[in-house]
Amino acid sequence: MDNKELANLIFPDAKEISYYEEKYPRRDLPEGAEVVRVAPSPTGFVHVGGLFQGIIARTIANQTNGVFFVRIEDTDQKREIENGAQEIINSFEEYDLAPDETVNIDGTDKGNYGPYIQSKRKEIYQSYAKYLIEQGKAYPCFCTPEEDKIRIENQTKAMERTGYYGKWAKCRNMPIDMAAERIKNGDPYIVRFKSPGNPDKKIKHKDVIKGNIDFPENDQDIVIIKSDGLPTYHFAHAVDDHLMGTTLVTRSDEWVSSIPLHIQLFTELGFKVPKYAHTAPLMKQDGDSKRKLSKRKDPEAAVSYYTEEGIPKEAVKEYLMNIANSNFESWRKANKEAPLSEFKFDIRKMGVSGALFDMVKLLDVSKGVISRYSGQEVLENVINWSEKFDKELNDLVLRDKEYSLKIFNIERGNNKPRKDIAKWSDVKESISYMFSDKFAKVKDFEYQTINEPEEIKKVISEYITNYFDINDDKQTWFDKMKDLAEKLGYAREVKEYKQNPEAYKGHVGDISTVIRITLTGRANTPDLYEIMQVLGENEVKSRLSK
């Protein structure tokens, strides 16, 4: 028996690889177009790192007039969760990262290079495994788990590398007839790749992000087809990326060490090796040290966390883009209203070390994003979010939508819009004082510089009696506040007070703070004049009188 007969014994129904080469022709794309993919496993919640990869891939495809596709790598079916693939696709669509090609939620394929779920491509992998066996580049392995355990123990005792290679590769040189006989007898087996590598030799590889890296050649005879007939990740990704025409593989740098193996697989299969770009992991500050953002420890590792907290998707995307390219922040400052798609992303500018994932910074970015929304956009977002996550807030804003819109329009549309909202879950607390029944529950008013009860009463009484007029324009209102300050012994301007503090009780800012706290219960709010206009004359008088 020869290799071809052995291959036919193992995979009698597998098609010739020429069938698939014709079925999946090379893509006809413009010069420079990149075909990029994200290939997540449906083994848990969608990690923000996966979203990070999706933003990078989608952006590269857009900027090069290329293709972005999502392939579901579900060959590890023991760890697969129910609806895992659907959660992945939903997350990408929610963040406006819908791939050009993928599996649809109903299980059909969107694109001509599917199936886009690996477990449905079993026959394809078996054809290419059969081809390798025919070429003498793969072989059946009958080693049991017990034998593998003993091998590892012996390698450890001998202080040698663990793995299936060289003299430790027990089935590598098994005679074909013996292997065939065992298969016919029903002995369980897997299929291994027969590596031609020599670890004493080096390969040079240029990573798009990390630059030039040297590796020892791979000499491990890795498993390519498991006992259940499904492929391992290493083999499947090589076959899929070839047939799907992937030109650029972006993935986490935990896969860097696999480069020698993957290049070897592509070469031995006769495939063109794609470019690889290994991105640094997202890190978390943990005390004095840093660690990878963890699914187990960090709630912000889950993409669903941002939806639940009400952090706009635009904010999450902008923050992740800032991590990807450090010059994004300065671009955003210079292009405040420009859509994210106008930023010229450069994958070569990505950092080679892990970027710190900073929730404080993300929320600051989110404040900036929300500040660019119109009042109507804020209202719609708050209604949509609270409908699912906060019934009390939903009832509050829907009580009078016109009034709620006036609240959200405060300090919007000007050169310095308000930045007091970082996420929709902040809104209830940030606007509650605008509703009389909620404000009535405020008992503690923490006054600032002016905190003597009699002085506070004097400020309020004088303001109501002689200076308050709801019909005043903003400049008139502010001039009256200065007049009030001067009458009560306070400086009309802050700078006057700073120049001669002994001459005044304080300054006009102290006076306005008394009014602000009395009307809102807070020392920090958006523009006080606009708040009073929304509250209306009767409510303002009622609060000041009380």
Image: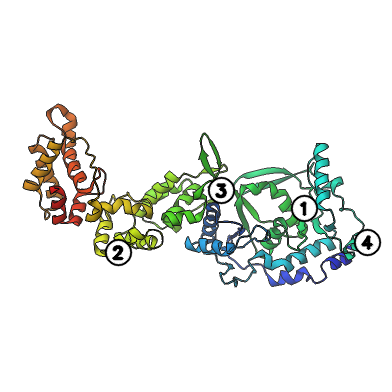
Q: How is the image coloured?
A: rainbow
Q: Which residue is mark 4?
A: 177
Q: Amino acid at mark 1?
A: Ile
Which type of secondary structure does the marked residue at label 1 adopt?
loop
Is 98 situated left or right of 175 in this image? Answer: left
Spot occupied by residue 210 in the image (x, y as percentages of width and height): 61, 45
Q: Amino acid at mark 4?
A: Asp
Q: Quadrant of residue 310?
A: bottom left
Q: Which one is earlier in the sequence, the residue at label 1 or at label 2?
A: 1
Q: Which one is earlier in the sequence, the residue at label 3 or at label 1?
A: 1
Q: Which residue is mark 3?
A: 296
Is residue 371 among what the camera can see?
no
In the foreground, 464 or 333: 464
Q: Gap in Å between the C-alphas at discs 2 and 4?
A: 78 Å
Which of the two discs, 2 and 4, sits closer to the camera?
Answer: 2
Residue at the image position 25 percent from the left and 64 percent from the top? 400
Is 442 situated left or right of 112 in this image? Answer: left
Is 281 situated left or right of 478 in this image? Answer: right
